[in-house]
Image (cartoon, rainbow, N blue to C red):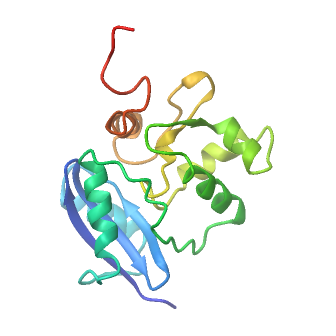
Amino acid sequence: MTTLGYTLFDTAVGTCGLVWSAAGVVGVQLPDTAPEPTRDELLGRFPAAVERPVPAAVQPVIDAVTAHLAGAPDDLRWVPIDYRNVSEFDTAVYEFARTVEPGAVATYGEVALRVGRPGGAQAVGQALGRNPVPVIVPCHRILAAGGGIGGFSAPGSTVTKRELLALEHAPGFDEPTLF
């Protein structure tokens, strides 16, 4: 079994967590109310992870996620992901979600069509609810039909989803305009 490392790191939105293996990022934990609940949630999802010093190859990922959450959007497609224990369908959904640029959105139905599952919007939503690497796989950019917010399984639920979309200046979620 491959050893999983993890670390907590401070961002503009709170303390996040990152889990990695030799193959790439395995998990991201968005902030909870304080660092300890964030750590507890992360270890609940990745019980084999051990807190370790951040390797040189992982530090740029932490720096990019930190910058992204501070308002300097990055598509983060360059970040390698270790999709261990992730189904083929979920991986296809996540890889499509990674093509949606910061500030843009897609619908669950559009994703379903693109991954070869017409009529599979609900399955797409369920897959995104299992996303182990939020922000790096930008599940927050996938909305319900008609621009509805849909769900979001990270701490803060749909409030966090709206905040991430606003941070990226997605139409309808950023600063209000007169026209």
Q: Position of residue 60 (x, y in %)?
A: 31, 71
Q: Residue at x 26, y 84 (%)?
A: 52
Q: Is residue 150 left or right of residue 86?
A: left
Quick check: 73 above or below 6? Answer: above
Is 175 placed left or right of 33 in the picture?
Answer: right
Relative height, residue 22 to residue 148 (above, below): below
Name the residue located 31 percent from the left edge and 61 percent from the top edge: 64
- State whether residue 108 is above or below residue 54: above
Which residue is located at x 59 percent, y 30 percent? 144
Left or right: residue 32 versus residue 111 is left
Q: Which of 2/178 is in front?
A: 178
Q: Can you say which quadrant of the picture contains the C terminus? A: top left
What is the residue that sits farthest to the top in this orientation?
178
Residue farthest to the bottom?
Answer: 1
Q: Is residue 29 left or right of residue 152?
A: left
Locate residue 41: give its quadrant: bottom left
Rendered location of residue 83, percent (x, y): 57, 71
Figure check: 159 above or below 146: below
For image coordinates 55% across by 24% down, the residue present is 147
| Number of residue marks | 0
Q: Looking at the rendering, which quadrant does residue 164 occupy?
A: top left
x, y (%) of residue 105? 53, 36
Q: Position of residue 68 (x, y in %)?
A: 31, 52
Q: Nearer the viewer, residue 115 or 157?
A: 115
